[in-house]
Image (cartoon, helix red, strand yellow):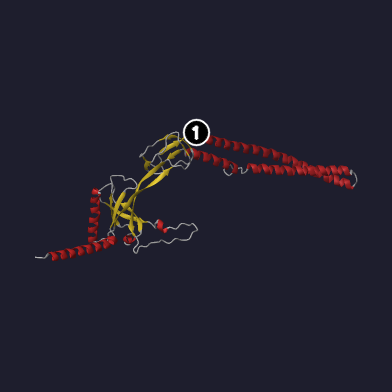
Amino acid sequence: MMSPEQKFARWVRVSIASFLLMFIYFIVADIWIPLTPDSTVMRVVTPVSARVSGYVSQVYVHNNSQVKKGDVLYELDPTPFINKVEAAQIALEQAKLTNQQLDAQIAAQLANLKTAQITARNNQATYSRYQRLATMQNVSQQDLDNVRTAWQNSQQSVSSLNASIDNLRIQRGERDDDRNVTLQKYRNALEQAQLDLGWTKIRAEADGTVSNLQLSPGLYTSAGNALLALVNHDTDIVADFREKSLRHTHAGTAAAVVFDALPGKVFRAHVTSSDAGILAGQQAVNGQLSQPEVSNRWVRDAQRMRIHIELDEAIDKTLPTGSRATVQLYNSEGIFARFFSGLQIRLVSWLHYVY
């Protein structure tokens, strides 16, 4: 029979051995079967705002409404936008009428140009004839000067008409309406007015759930001012692990997930990707010198990196964005690793019932 001193020594040895075994287990487990409670359910949240400013006339949803892509969420008063469309249509038609008037003016000036060209040719012929008569002294110098002046004036009329026609053609632009710059400007204004009118109906850009609704009919909203949030149905689970825990992790690595909202249930999953970095690894471009991190600790805290997890099976309950979870990775395919990792995650799932 052992003495009390022997019993105490045995318990000390058992305690030390147990401690060493647990220490070794945690070191090995952190590499081959790591587990983290720092996991979060993330769903893309889109702030919804109007692209134009105006007064809200209709609201078609309420908080937690389930909507499909293309559903109308709310509508602005379209009256001022309808007026802008009509004004743009009138401006376009007026531009077309202006081009028709310019066409008529060009045709009239072309007719005047032909008359002026005939007059100039006749005056030139008369001047040439008077020059021949002047050499024989059959006409006076004054008559010759008058004929020369008439010829020069007719030439100036031709030049003036050509310049006027060129100016009218510049105002008219391309005769092809599809390439006419003036008409294109008014068509663009009409298209923009029609776009603005269409944007008075604010639609869902994806399937999701309406949240944080902050509008009612009569409220004035400015373009870009978010009045509700649309929470996407697609779920992304992010998990933060110590760097060394991810040395054997890659896309496709098997995983298991336990949600705080669903205690006692373990869901199969797999790793889809890992982030290229974290905020601590990003330097702001501010023109200042670097500031080294100061730490007096001999062993600093391990850095954590983020990976993304996707479930292999559907869940009955839609979890809100921000829900917490625990993720277990299977970096090893060994039987013993699978056994102990299964124990770990199931123990956590049962602990969630209590805490």
Residue 26 visible within the image = yes
How many marks the image carries: the answer is 1
Judging depth in this view, the residue of 194 and 172 nearest the camera is 194
Q: Along the line of sight, which residue is nearer the eye, 68 or 294? A: 294
Q: Where is residue 212 shown, x and y percent of the image?
A: 38, 41
Give the residue pinned by disc 1: 79
Q: Quadrant of the N terminus?
A: bottom left
Q: What's the residue at 52%, 39% (across, down)?
A: 193
The extreme right residue here reads 137
Residue furthest to the left in view is 1
SS at circle 1: helix
From the viewer's perspective, tell me whether residue 139 is left or right of residue 96: right
The image shows residue 187 at horizontal and vertical percentages of: 55, 40
Q: Position of residue 330 (x, y in %)?
A: 28, 58
Amino acid at circle 1: Thr
Q: Percent position (x, y) of residue 177?
A: 58, 42
**Residue for point 55% across, 40% down:** 189
Name the image quarter holding residue 96. top right
How many residues crowd mark 1 within 10 Å: few (<14), some (14–19), many (20+)?
A: few
- In the picture, measured across the screen, residue 139 lies left or right of residue 266, that is right
Residue 126, visible in the rendered structure:
no
In the image, taking residue 290 as reference, residue 340 lies left or right, namely left
Q: 72 or 94, which is in the foreground?
A: 72
Find residue 74 and report its image quarter: top left
Which corner quadrant of the image does residue 9 belong to? bottom left
Q: Nearer the viewer, residue 219 or 174?
A: 219
Residue drawn at (31%, 49%), measured in percent from left and top?
324
